Image (cartoon, rainbow, N blue to C red):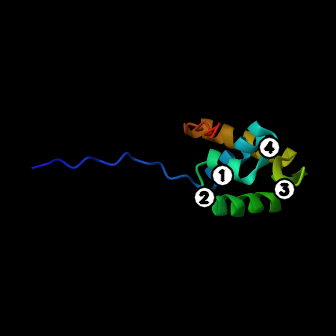
Amino acid sequence: MAKKKKKAERIKRTRYDIYAELIRVIYIYGYCPLTRAARSTNMPVDRAKDTITELMERGLLEEDDDEGQRVYSVTVRGHQYLELYKRMAALVGIPVPDPIIGM
């Protein structure tokens, strides 16, 4: 009888984890287009676009124009969110994953 392999356990990301990941990636790149942010956070582009729109509505990101291309940058409020997220994660012992850079 063959043994079934267990699937690698995945930790489900909360909305706040996704917010923090997107903000970190955009912060690392400085000015970041949508597709790069989506790939670096391992998200579908449509879902990343919805999330980025939500973050802009909350004042955490802002949209800029770079030679006809729409790019995003982190606001002061976005930096504050990221710092609070890192402190909370450290308090409860959750590791903050590194973003997937260079895709």
Residue type, mark 1 in image: Ala
Q: Which residue is drawn at 60% across and 54% down?
A: 43
Residue type, mark 2 in image: Pro
Q: Give the Cα distance between marks 3 and 2.
A: 22 Å
Q: Is residue 49 left or right of residue 97?
A: right
Q: Give the mark nearest the N terminus, 4 or 1.
A: 1
Label 2: how many Cα within 10 Å (few below 14, some 14–19, many 20+): few
Q: Residue at x 78, y 46 (%)?
A: 32
Q: Is residue 85 left or right of residue 30?
A: left
Determine which residue is flagged by label 1.
38
Q: Give the Cα distance between marks 4 and 1.
A: 22 Å
Question: Looking at the picture, how far across and down is residue 55, in whole percent?
Answer: 76, 57
Q: Which residue is drawn at 81% across and 58% down?
A: 56
Task: Verify CB contact (< 8 Å) between mark 4 and mark 3.
Answer: no
Determine which residue is flagged by label 3.
59
Q: Which of 20 and 70 is in front in this view?
A: 70
**Label number found at residue 44:** 2
Task: Verify CB contact (< 8 Å) between mark 2 and mark 1.
Answer: yes
Task: Verify CB contact (< 8 Å) between mark 4 and mark 2.
Answer: no
Question: Looking at the picture, how far across and down is residue 12, in whole percent?
Answer: 50, 53
Q: Give the mark nearest the N terminus, 2 or 1.
A: 1
